[in-house]
Image: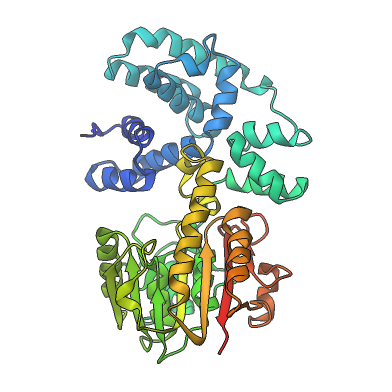
Amino acid sequence: MFSVQNNPRRAAYDILLRVDEGSFADLVLDAVLRRSTLDPRDRGLVTELVYGILRLRGRIDFALEHFSKQPLKRLQPEVLRLLRLGAYQLLELDRVPAHAAVNSTIELARQLQLEKATGFLNGVLRALERGKGEIPWPEPENLRRYLQQVCSQPVWLSKEVMRLLPNAEARALGEALAQAAPTSLRVNTLKTNREDYLAALAAAGFAARPCRFAPEGIVIERRAAERLPGDDEGLYQIQDEASMLIPHLLDVHPGQKVLDCCAAPGGKTTHIAALTAGGADILALDKYPQRLELLAQGAKRLGCANIETRCWDLTVQPEFLTECRFDRVLLDAPCSGLGVLRRNPEGRWNKSSVDLRELAVIQQTILENVAGLVAPGGKLLYSVCTFSQGETDAVIDDFLADHPEFVLEDLAAASAPEWAPLFTARGTLRSYPHRHDGMDAFFAARLRRRE
């Protein structure tokens, strides 16, 4: 049970505790805010503290190490959690006075019956406030340490980024992943259009602009006190711009049979329905029944038709579909989520390079299990919200080596000229936040089955 009361810092502490125990930050945060009586400003502070501390934990710990006489790894988890809470406010939140950041942390320690730690907490945080301008932050030229201690990347992740990109781009990607993600949404074209919805946002006091690439996408640059207009009516779906590109790349048309393999929670499924005006027959599969229920609820809210759902774990051959052939198959595969670390920042700290290798095996298994469901002349789009080589190009290369009946299509050749910056030389999609207007990092490859 959470002790939110009217204290946003206590709420943030309790959420961070649950994340340390293995929960997902977004789910716990949503549950807490639904139950809370906090005003909008304090709800915003809870969100800022939770996501900020998880995103910048490496940076925060580097700063704290210069002022703590005890190694951080030897501290009680409760004390370290409090230190991070106070330090984030001192380092990153100019609007919070230093005395408020320190005193609120000490008071919270007392509430948590950590009275013996108050002297230590007070000493470290006040030393940090006095000396934060003298912290010896690594320079960008020392890229490995810069990524780890300024951009807050664990060792395994910094190695992955440096292996993937030249130094200047590795730095730019690291800096982008250390920032908060933009808020973007997809206009539901079954019910309205982007121009009308932008006008509705402006009338409600929001500042917003069209996305650079996705024709239905909008970026919210400044929120208003009210809810987004059209929530109950299903006029929009919260979704990153990179995710909005995937249904377009599937090249689906009305009258076609579509298999959405790992569909929940359904942002891409409902987008496919919108692109075809409900004219495609969509079968949406997912491993988890509760997530499929979310998909069904979302489809109803958005007014999407012709979507059938079924619970199935595609690491097992879907024998009930052996006689079926689909014109289009979307495999948005389970992955490490490195491309969405700004939105799921705990992924920095609860994953490793071993996880990436294990996920690649799962991706290859699912791809193998659905390949036979593609009709001759049909297309299979493989997408992941990550940038690791092992989950992207390596998966596609291994699949093509074993399946000469498929060919890799050039996505650039079949897309609008203004989308050209999104594609690699071999015709796959690779989006990055530092290159493409802040969108998440995604990969996609389209495979066509020979007739």
Name the residue at 50% across, 87% down.
Answer: 376
Provide residue 166's location: percent of width, then percent of height: 77, 49
Name the residue at 25% across, 59% down.
Answer: 290
Q: In the figure, residue 167 lies in which quadrant?
A: top right
Name the residue at 28% across, 65% down.
Answer: 292
Residue 127 appears in view: yes
**424 is higher (above) or lower (below) than 92:** below
Q: Which quadrant of the rendered structure holds the C terminus? A: bottom right
**306 is higher (above) or lower (below) than 47:** below
Q: 261 or 432, which is in the foreground? A: 261
Name the residue at 45% across, 62% down.
Answer: 206
Q: Which quadrant of the rendered structure holds the N terminus? A: top left
Instruction: Spot the residue most to the right.
Output: 141
The count of marks equals 0
Q: 285 or 278, which is in the foreground? A: 285
Q: In the figure, residue 316 lies in which quadrant?
A: bottom left
Provide residue 114's location: percent of width, then percent of height: 32, 13
- Tell me how the rendering is colored: rainbow
Provide residue 142's location: percent of width, then percent of height: 76, 33
Q: 130 or 216, which is in the foreground? A: 216
Q: Is residue 176 toward the left or the right of residue 5 in the image?
A: right
Q: Is residue 101 toward the left or the right of residue 148 in the image?
A: left
Q: In the figure, residue 297 lies in which quadrant?
A: bottom left
Provide residue 260's location: percent of width, then percent of height: 40, 73
Residue 233 appears in view: no
Q: 402 or 308, which is in the foreground? A: 402
**233 is higher (above) or lower (below) than 152:** below
